[in-house]
Amino acid sequence: MPGTVAAMVEASVFWTVQVLTAILLAGLFLRGRFRACPSFVLYLLVILTGDLLLHLGPRHLDPESSLFGLLGAKGFYSRSLWLIYQLAINLARFAVALELAFRTFRSFRAPGVPREASSSS
């Protein structure tokens, strides 16, 4: 009995997170705020698609499957796909950090540099 309750709680948390992520993405696009930080939108898309692939993808693949050569017999639960997923998440996080750093520090100018020179670059 506790296994079924734990599975229900896990599934409800998973789907709640997916729905909230989709609502967040829809709100960003409907209000046109996706232009404010495009790397954040990329990060959300990577998270959403990766989680859905891992949750809804096949747990085992037949050797006749076209994905068998890439993922192996374990399907979407393979180590290679998980490593690719984690790499994509980390690259998207790094892109968000770079974009935020650029937006933060671009307004500062070096001492002695005229205002016209710093605003044109």
Image (cartoon, rainbow, N blue to C red):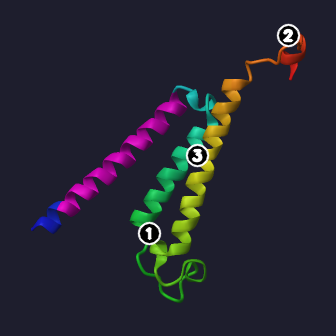
**Label 2 crowd (10 A; few <14 / some 14-19 / many >=20):** few
Residue 42 in magenta stretch: no
Q: What residue type is labelled 1?
A: Gly
Q: Mark 1: which secondary structure?
A: loop
The span picked out in magenta is 6-30
Is 88 above or below relative to 118?
below
- Closer to us: 60 or 77: 77
77 left or right, relative to 104: left
43 left or right, relative to 103: left
Is 82 above or below relative to 106?
below
Main SS type for the magenta part?
helix
Q: Dot 3 corresponds to which residue?
A: 93
CB under 8 Å between discs 1 and 2: no
Q: Dot 1 corresponds to which residue?
A: 57
Percent coordinates x, y for residue 24 in the rendering: 45, 36
Q: Which of marks 1 and 2 is nearer the N terminus?
A: 1
